Image (spheres, rainbow, N blue to C red):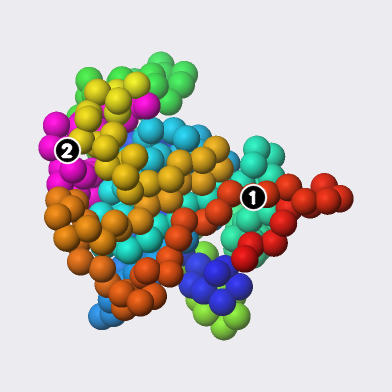
Amino acid sequence: SFYNGQVFVSYKDTVFEPSSAIRHSAEFLNALNVQYEHQILPPILCLYTDGGPDHRCNYGSVQIALICLFLCGDFDLLIAVRTAPNHSWTNPAERVMSTLNIGLQGVALKRDQMSPGSEALFETANTLDDIRKKAQESNELTSELKESITNIQNLLNNRTERLLFKDKKFRCHEPANEERIAALFESISDIDSTLRIEETTQAQIRRHPTLVEFINTHCRARAYSFQIKKCNNPTCLYCKPIRLPLSEFNTLSFLPDPIPSQGNLFSSYN
């Protein structure tokens, strides 16, 4: 948990590294590999995130990203839970923001100047989509724009890595690049090799019968959670061997649904 774990931070380029569910999964897997370097990843992974669109468990793109993370990390069980809308304050990891703010106090940021041609082209763009379209037309704008914020990212990384939580320094890592994202997405080809990274809405997923079958037999989807579990079926074409002792795995079950109790409360989990 946040209270006794390692804090990882990455500063992304909003133009060329937009937030997405598959990018988050790639970066989270990278953080796990760094944290458990020279070790085996835990067999069970539990995620608790805010309720933003990149973490909304009933979105097809989020479910696909979590399945990719499950397969690539070879987890026996993956549980992803999101907070209700406007309730991200209930996520303990959000409280690290107060410490991050200390590192950013008194900081003014300004990107480096680009060439006159790139600056003129950049000034004609009013939105992020406009900037991306201009960048597709000009390789110079793409490279110069990325280079112009490099010093900003280095400054933020330097200040962030001077922060401490329980005597542990914060760790910064590079945002996931397209190659790393593609490598993570490639893991789902074990289930359906025809799925494309740009076709992950619920309507598009329903056109892939083998993927739908996997979700029906290995996953549990709820409004605020999405869970994936190995089936321990020797004939299963998708699951790798169980990593937990079989006696422990047989006691595992999906996280149960909340059951209302008296006094506007929920019953305790058994």
* Boundaries of the magenta span: 177-202
Name the residue furthest top.
124
Q: Is residue 215 left or right of residue 270?
A: left
Q: Quadrant of residue 13?
A: top left
Q: Is residue 53 left or right of residue 262?
A: left
Residue occupied by mark 2: 192
Q: Position of residue 170 (x, y in %)?
A: 50, 70
Up-down relation of residue 78 to residue 199 (above or below): below
Q: Is residue 75 left or right of residue 254?
A: left
Q: Quadrant of residue 252?
A: bottom left
Q: Disc 2 on helix, strand or loop?
A: loop
- Is residue 243 in sight in this rendering? yes
Amino acid identity at mark 1: Pro
197 or 188, which is in the foreground? Answer: 188
Q: Position of residue 103 (x, y in %)?
A: 60, 63
Residue occupied by mark 1: 258
